[in-house]
Image: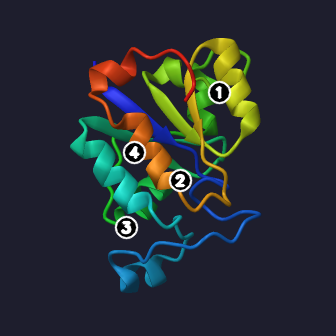
Protein backbone atom coordinates (compact mmCIF):
# COMPACT_ATOMS: atom_id res chain seq x y z
CA UNK A 1 0.00 0.00 0.00
CA UNK A 2 1.33 3.48 -0.82
CA UNK A 3 2.44 5.82 1.93
CA UNK A 4 0.28 8.92 1.96
CA UNK A 5 0.62 12.40 3.38
CA UNK A 6 -2.34 14.80 3.31
CA UNK A 7 -2.42 18.54 3.77
CA UNK A 8 -5.33 20.45 5.24
CA UNK A 9 -6.36 23.59 3.35
CA UNK A 10 -7.89 26.38 5.47
CA UNK A 11 -5.28 28.14 7.62
CA UNK A 12 -2.75 25.43 6.74
CA UNK A 13 -2.27 26.06 3.00
CA UNK A 14 -4.98 28.60 2.17
CA UNK A 15 -5.29 31.95 3.89
CA UNK A 16 -8.36 32.28 6.02
CA UNK A 17 -7.62 34.20 9.18
CA UNK A 18 -3.83 34.49 8.68
CA UNK A 19 -1.84 36.40 6.09
CA UNK A 20 1.09 34.03 5.55
CA UNK A 21 3.19 34.47 2.38
CA UNK A 22 1.91 32.79 -0.78
CA UNK A 23 3.58 30.80 -3.55
CA UNK A 24 3.77 32.26 -7.01
CA UNK A 25 1.69 30.05 -9.33
CA UNK A 26 3.60 28.15 -11.99
CA UNK A 27 1.22 29.58 -14.58
CA UNK A 28 0.36 33.10 -13.32
CA UNK A 29 -1.77 34.07 -16.33
CA UNK A 30 -3.91 30.96 -16.01
CA UNK A 31 -4.15 31.48 -12.26
CA UNK A 32 -5.47 35.01 -12.85
CA UNK A 33 -7.87 33.76 -15.50
CA UNK A 34 -9.26 30.95 -13.33
CA UNK A 35 -9.21 33.05 -10.18
CA UNK A 36 -9.21 31.07 -6.99
CA UNK A 37 -7.11 31.07 -3.89
CA UNK A 38 -3.37 31.19 -3.35
CA UNK A 39 -1.33 28.48 -1.64
CA UNK A 40 1.04 28.96 1.28
CA UNK A 41 4.65 29.60 0.47
CA UNK A 42 6.63 26.39 0.77
CA UNK A 43 3.98 23.93 -0.45
CA UNK A 44 5.77 23.34 -3.76
CA UNK A 45 9.01 22.51 -1.94
CA UNK A 46 7.19 20.34 0.64
CA UNK A 47 5.29 18.39 -2.04
CA UNK A 48 8.46 17.78 -4.07
CA UNK A 49 10.30 16.56 -0.98
CA UNK A 50 7.48 14.20 -0.05
CA UNK A 51 7.40 12.72 -3.56
CA UNK A 52 11.20 12.31 -3.52
CA UNK A 53 10.78 10.27 -0.32
CA UNK A 54 8.21 8.02 -2.03
CA UNK A 55 5.10 9.55 -0.43
CA UNK A 56 1.81 10.25 -2.19
CA UNK A 57 0.53 13.82 -1.77
CA UNK A 58 -3.13 14.29 -0.87
CA UNK A 59 -5.45 17.00 0.44
CA UNK A 60 -7.84 16.33 3.32
CA UNK A 61 -10.16 19.25 4.01
CA UNK A 62 -13.43 19.77 5.83
CA UNK A 63 -14.40 22.36 3.22
CA UNK A 64 -16.98 21.80 0.52
CA UNK A 65 -14.64 22.87 -2.29
CA UNK A 66 -14.93 20.39 -5.14
CA UNK A 67 -12.15 17.90 -5.76
CA UNK A 68 -11.85 19.32 -9.28
CA UNK A 69 -11.33 22.86 -7.94
CA UNK A 70 -8.69 21.65 -5.45
CA UNK A 71 -6.81 19.63 -8.08
CA UNK A 72 -6.83 22.62 -10.44
CA UNK A 73 -5.57 24.96 -7.69
CA UNK A 74 -2.60 22.68 -7.01
CA UNK A 75 -1.98 22.06 -10.72
CA UNK A 76 -1.65 25.84 -11.22
CA UNK A 77 1.28 25.60 -8.78
CA UNK A 78 2.82 22.60 -10.53
CA UNK A 79 1.63 20.03 -7.97
CA UNK A 80 -0.18 16.85 -9.00
CA UNK A 81 -2.35 15.48 -6.22
CA UNK A 82 -2.78 11.74 -5.74
CA UNK A 83 -6.06 12.16 -3.88
CA UNK A 84 -8.52 14.64 -2.44
CA UNK A 85 -10.82 14.15 0.53
CA UNK A 86 -13.34 16.96 0.98
CA UNK A 87 -16.26 17.16 3.41
CA UNK A 88 -18.65 15.33 1.06
CA UNK A 89 -16.19 12.44 0.63
CA UNK A 90 -15.50 12.38 4.38
CA UNK A 91 -19.24 12.25 5.19
CA UNK A 92 -19.77 9.38 2.74
CA UNK A 93 -16.96 7.15 3.97
CA UNK A 94 -15.95 7.90 7.57
CA UNK A 95 -17.70 5.85 10.24
CA UNK A 96 -15.80 7.29 13.21
CA UNK A 97 -17.20 10.39 14.86
CA UNK A 98 -14.40 12.91 14.43
CA UNK A 99 -13.51 15.93 12.33
CA UNK A 100 -11.06 14.01 10.16
CA UNK A 101 -10.11 10.34 10.03
CA UNK A 102 -7.08 9.82 7.75
CA UNK A 103 -6.88 6.02 8.29
CA UNK A 104 -10.19 5.61 6.45
CA UNK A 105 -8.39 6.77 3.30
CA UNK A 106 -5.04 5.08 3.94
CA UNK A 107 -3.42 8.40 4.89
CA UNK A 108 -0.38 7.93 7.15
CA UNK A 109 0.30 11.55 8.12
CA UNK A 110 -1.94 14.61 8.15
CA UNK A 111 -0.48 18.13 8.14
CA UNK A 112 -3.04 20.43 9.76
CA UNK A 113 -3.11 23.74 11.62
CA UNK A 114 -5.58 22.53 14.25
CA UNK A 115 -4.57 21.43 17.72
CA UNK A 116 -8.04 19.85 17.98
CA UNK A 117 -7.29 17.57 15.03
CA UNK A 118 -3.99 16.61 16.70
CA UNK A 119 -5.95 15.63 19.83
CA UNK A 120 -8.31 13.55 17.70
CA UNK A 121 -5.24 11.89 16.22
CA UNK A 122 -4.09 10.89 19.69
CA UNK A 123 -7.54 9.60 20.55
CA UNK A 124 -8.11 7.65 17.32
CA UNK A 125 -4.54 6.58 16.61
CA UNK A 126 -3.46 8.62 13.59
CA UNK A 127 -0.47 10.90 13.03
CA UNK A 128 -0.92 14.66 12.82
CA UNK A 129 1.79 17.22 12.29
CA UNK A 130 0.54 20.60 13.45
CA UNK A 131 1.71 23.37 11.11
CA UNK A 132 0.48 26.63 12.65
CA UNK A 133 -0.18 29.40 10.12
CA UNK A 134 2.36 31.67 11.81
CA UNK A 135 5.15 29.04 11.64
CA UNK A 136 7.62 30.19 8.99
CA UNK A 137 9.56 26.90 9.41
CA UNK A 138 6.64 24.60 8.68
CA UNK A 139 8.31 23.01 5.63
CA UNK A 140 11.28 21.93 7.77
CA UNK A 141 8.83 20.23 10.16
CA UNK A 142 7.25 18.35 7.23
CA UNK A 143 10.70 17.33 6.00
CA UNK A 144 11.57 15.96 9.45
CA UNK A 145 8.28 14.09 9.68
CA UNK A 146 8.72 12.32 6.32
CA UNK A 147 12.52 12.27 6.19
CA UNK A 148 12.87 8.57 6.88
CA UNK A 149 11.86 5.88 4.45
CA UNK A 150 8.10 5.62 3.85
CA UNK A 151 8.02 2.18 5.47
CA UNK A 152 9.63 3.51 8.66
CA UNK A 153 7.31 6.51 8.79
CA UNK A 154 4.18 4.46 8.10
CA UNK A 155 4.92 2.28 11.12
CA UNK A 156 5.05 5.17 13.58
CA UNK A 157 1.97 5.51 15.73
CA UNK A 158 2.82 8.55 17.81
CA UNK A 159 2.24 12.10 16.70
CA UNK A 160 5.40 14.08 15.89
The residue that mark 4 highlights is 143
Which label sits on residue 91?
1
Specify which label sits upstream in the sequence, 3 or 2: 3
In the rendered structure, the answer to whether residue 40 lies left or right of residue 152 reads right
Comparing 150 with 63, the one in front is: 150
Residue at the location (58% across, 31% down)? 128
Circle 1: element type: helix
Residues marked 3 and 2 touching at CB (< 8 Å): no
Residue at the location (49% across, 58% down)? 69
* Tag in front: 3 or 4: 4
Comparing 138 with 92, the one in front is: 138
Instruction: Measure how far apart labels 2 and 1 are at the Cα level.
Output: 29 Å
Which label sits on residue 77?
3
Say which quadrant the C terminus sits in. top right
Circle 2: element type: helix
- Residue 99 on image: x %, y %: 71, 29
Residue at the location (39% across, 14% down)? 155
Circle 3: element type: loop
The residue that mark 2 highlights is 138
Amino acid sequence: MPVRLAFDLDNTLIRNNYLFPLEQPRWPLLARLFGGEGLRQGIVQAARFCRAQGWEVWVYTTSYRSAWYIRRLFWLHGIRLDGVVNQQWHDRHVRVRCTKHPPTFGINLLVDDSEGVRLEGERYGFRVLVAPPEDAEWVAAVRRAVGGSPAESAGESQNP
